[in-house]
Image: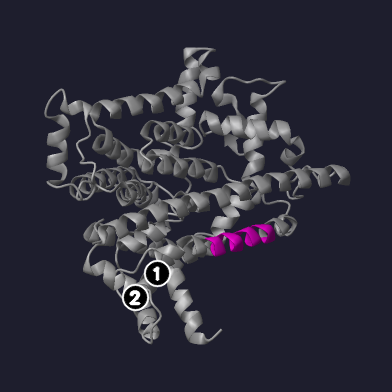
Amino acid sequence: MQTGTATTWALRLLTDSRYYWHLFSLIFLGEVALCAVHKQRLDAYYRSFPTTNQDTNIDYLAYTEQAALFLPPTNIRDYSQLKGGTGPLVYPALHLYIYSTLHRLLPAASNPDVGGFVPGKRDLEAGLQVTGKESLRTVQYLWAGVYLSTLALVAWIYRQVITSVDAQTTGTTKKDDDRERQPSTRTPVRLVNLVCGPSPPLQPFLLLLPLSKRLHSIYMLRLFNDPLAMVLFYAAVVCACKRRWYLGAAVYSLALGVKMNILLFLPGLLVLLFQYKGAVSTILALSIILGIQLFLPAPFFLTSRESASKYFSSAFDLGREFTFKWSVNWRWVGEERFLSSGMKWGLLASHAVALIAFAWFKWSAPVPGGTLAVLKRGLSGIQALQRAPVPQGIESGLHIPFVLFTSNILGIIFARSLHYQFLSWYAHQLPFLLWLTRWPLVVCAALWLMVLWVWDSFPPSVTGSAVLFVVHAAILLGVFWNGERRN
């Protein structure tokens, strides 16, 4: 194949929406191969750490140690008593059910000596260790499936964004796009424009998704619970884009039942529910979310009112203290300021102000009349409460991810602390947010690599946390300034 022809086809893969799934298929197959490589590295990963360093234990072992207390013979129903070597259980009930089920099905995977680096457990028979490693590798396969499922769901969401942008492109612009899709001698110029020109298409941003070494570790080596919450959340976004709002609310609540960070999406979700369903339906969707949150921990409610109180104080502890040692985002402010109450309340206030700014100026921007018009149409009378204040012509494929993902990044920027596994909270959303800035692709790729450099560096450093803060702030300002409209 000639060089010009190859470049032309590469450009088509990167810019022509008709080849979107072709490009994603190549990325997906590469990720399948990469997952296989990561699974083969498991034994080497275990052997690479000293046996006296408990900080390197994979989190799956800590989770199942706590979850085992929920099962016979202990059958503990006091949430505050579900404790392990790393402390008490601090995650909601669905997390507990998932890991207790895995422990019941694959008990050998929970053996603390399967990796050979937990002190005090080094005298087990070799055969038991082999069985444990094989069982743990089975869990790895499950998490690899979660990783690939997340990638597929995110790709579907990105495709809806592109469809929305294409729907806004009509007339002369569409004809110009069709001409650009044809082979020509201007291919080098088009390539330069793609890389260095403003407002690049979203399609090439797919190439950024598989680049994070840390993300692969979070999913397939450390087996954190964050990926389980996020795959459920992205499934809820798909439901929302399909206008299955009540089903989406239920799936969202299941994600919240795994980990509390899903609350960061709630402000955006409430705005979307009000815009697309109206006030009455928003209350109904909230009732679904709350109902599931009350149903999931029912075993802990049936014992006593005190047990119910202990459940919510453990699973949804909003006042939890964080350790400066593991803070990826605030190392640059120093430990004294990090631990101060002033910073805690300052971040909370800044988060609230930023949410109000986005809710007022950006989240209703595509609607004629903006936020005031939406509120007036949705709250002007009894009948208005029962109908959607946003006209049906407003395209949801771009608007829904925009609102939800910006709601999340605001919470991440003003988070009290970010630990390494928290990268999974927004890693698949960041390329979309970079695209929203309309900055050149080369600039967006450079910012993405800077973020990955920070997250892939260990331990957290002052320089890395400062770089992360600056990049996050730049992306947030770029998104706020350029907004959602693409035509």
Q: Is residue 378 left or right of residue 147?
A: left
Residue 456 location (% of width, % of height): 53, 62
**Majority secondary structure of the magenta segment?**
helix
Q: In the rendered image of this protein, does residue 371 appear above or below residue 170?
A: above
The tag on residue 15 is 1
Q: Is residue 147 left or right of residue 69?
A: left
The tag on residue 65 is none
Residue 481 location (% of width, % of height): 22, 60
Q: Earlier in the sequence, mark 1 or mark 2?
A: 1
| Residue at the spot 28% in from the left edge and 48% down from the top edge | 395
Residue 270 location (% of width, % of height): 30, 36
Q: In the rendered image of this protein, does residue 158 appear above or below residue 119?
A: below
Classify residue 184 by image quadrant: bottom left
**Element type at marker 1?**
helix
Q: Is residue 350 left or right of residue 140?
A: left
Given the image, on which type of amino acid does mark 1 rest?
A: Thr
In the image, the segment drawn in magenta is: 25-37
Question: Viewer-nearest of labels 1 and 2?
Answer: 2
Q: Nearer the viewer, residue 353 or 250?
A: 250
| Residue at the spot 22% in from the left edge and 26% down from the top edge | 386
Residue 205 location (% of width, % of height): 42, 64
Q: Is residue 419 visible?
A: no
The tag on residue 180 is 2
Mark 2 nearby-residue class (10 Å; few <14, some 14–19, many ≥20): some
Q: Considering the image in quadrants, where does the N terminus appear?
A: bottom right
Q: Nearer the viewer, residue 435 or 383?
A: 383
Q: Mark 1 and mark 2 in contact? Answer it, CB < 8 Å.
A: yes
